[in-house]
Amino acid sequence: MKPKILIVDDEARMQRILEINLSPKYEVITSGEGEDALRVVKTQNISLMLTDLKMPGKSGLELLQEVRKVRSDLPVIIMTAYGTVESAVQAMKEGATDYILKPIKIDEMELMVEKTLSLSRLQAENRDLRQELKTIYGPGNIVGNHPTMQKVLQLIQQVAGTKATVLVQGESGTGKELVARAIHFESDRSSKPFVVINCAAIPSTLLESELFGYEKGAFTGASKTKKGRLELADKGTLFLDEIGEMPKELQVKILRVLEEQKFQHIGGTGDIEVDIRIIAATNKDLRQAVEAGNFREDLYYRLKVISIAIPPLHERKEDIPLLVGHFLAKHREAFKKNVSGVSEEALGLLVDYPWPGNARELENVLVRAIVLSSSEWIGVEDLPGEIRGQKEGIEGKIPLDSQDLKRMKKIAQKRIKEEMEKKFVEEALRQGEGNILRSAEKVGMDRRQFQNLIKRYGISKKDFVKN
């Protein structure tokens, strides 16, 4: 389908000349005055408007201002005589894409139209891509009806529009990067870079150069100047994953970036100013790291302006069926498998499993099941042995091969660990007479860690309170 071009000029001869020259490539609509042109813009899918600046009634500038209220994205080229160049410049300030002087050279006009339409298509593709990224990484991709997850979603919406530094805390696999991306793509920085650096995945000797960049000749092998992640994230967001693994000598430099939005290349002497938002994530207890002297207290408080805690999956088991449906919808098309869902028995096993690897482990298990499933419904037989083993039992069984031996050993180890932990918690509660803080202190545990064990094994503290 040819792009539609609207030509607005009070001279019929000029309309006809432009129509003849542009109609081989484009569908051309002509209009002699502003009000009629505005009606066309409102009712038809116009790709580009060419309008004269000086017209009786509504001028080209007034038409532009009205069009911008209706179609802010419509490219507009202003046609003007030499004596009204200043007005054309004013039109550019009002949102015109370009202007061309009369008398018009047709080849120049054709080139300008082609260039403007190409740029417009590119901008539309960028808008679509940004919208797609927002759909993929926005809050709508974070699944959970549990109150703690609803609180996470509420915090994302509240902080996205600010520049506040955010610390995302949670076990591995809970979706910390997903939360960070959601904050970025809900913010006014969504069209700018989202740059990730994993502080645990890069050797400490290389982490500084990756973050800050370096000047040519700063060290052996620095053959040219290189930008670091801080520069690449300018105007956007820098996500510092596993911030708890960052060496202390770098922590002070990151603190300066947070406070002053300035830093220096390795080997550089001048400050580089940036406008970045920092979101950090950790699976560690940074408060304990501060007390142990492994993390700077001033950086901890500077990062924790807004704190978002993501609960582990075993604490929100009611969200597992929702996540199962979400991951199936996400992956079945990619693997071209006609999988409708999960059998009731298989879903029961998925809900009962403790998920030490959290949502990431659940997603990997479902991807495996989609690939291996030979029917419309994922069954118990499609699940890994460690999940099936919850109901299978291993007492009295002899392993059939090395894989079966490995699976049964895992099940046995898991059961012994769980039984030991449960007895440990129950004994601590007996000693502490049902008081969680007292019980935790008696066994040398953090109150929150002890409480998590109570929740994990469904132990009621009331059973240990002396009457």
Image (tube, helix red, strand yellow):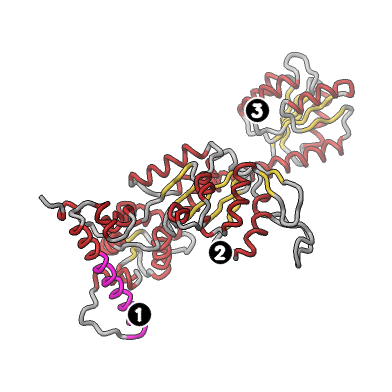
Residue 418 drawn in magenta: yes
Q: Secondary structure at mark 3?
A: helix
Residue of label 3? 41
Q: Residue at x 54, y 44 (%)?
A: 185
Q: Amino acid at mark 2?
A: Ala
Q: Amino acid at mark 1?
A: Lys
Q: Nearer the viewer, mark 1 or mark 3?
A: 1
Residue of label 2? 201
Q: Secondary structure at mark 2?
A: loop
User: How much space separates mark 2 and mark 1, taking CA atoms?
Assistant: 29 Å
Residue of label 1? 406
x and y percent of residue 220 in the render?
Answer: 76, 67
Residue 89 drawn in magenta: no
Query: In the rendered structure, which segment of residues is drawn in magenta?
Result: 401-421
Q: Is residue 136 visible?
A: no
Please rate how many residues cluster around mark 2, counting C-alpha atoms within 10 Å: few if below 14, some from 14 to 19, many from 20: few
Q: Nearer the viewer, mark 2 or mark 1?
A: 2
User: How much space separates mark 1 and mark 3, taking CA atoms?
Assistant: 70 Å
Query: Extreme top residue here?
Result: 57
Q: Amino acid at mark 3?
A: Val
Q: Residue at x 61, y 56 (%)?
A: 250
Mark 2 or mark 1: which comes first in sequence?
2
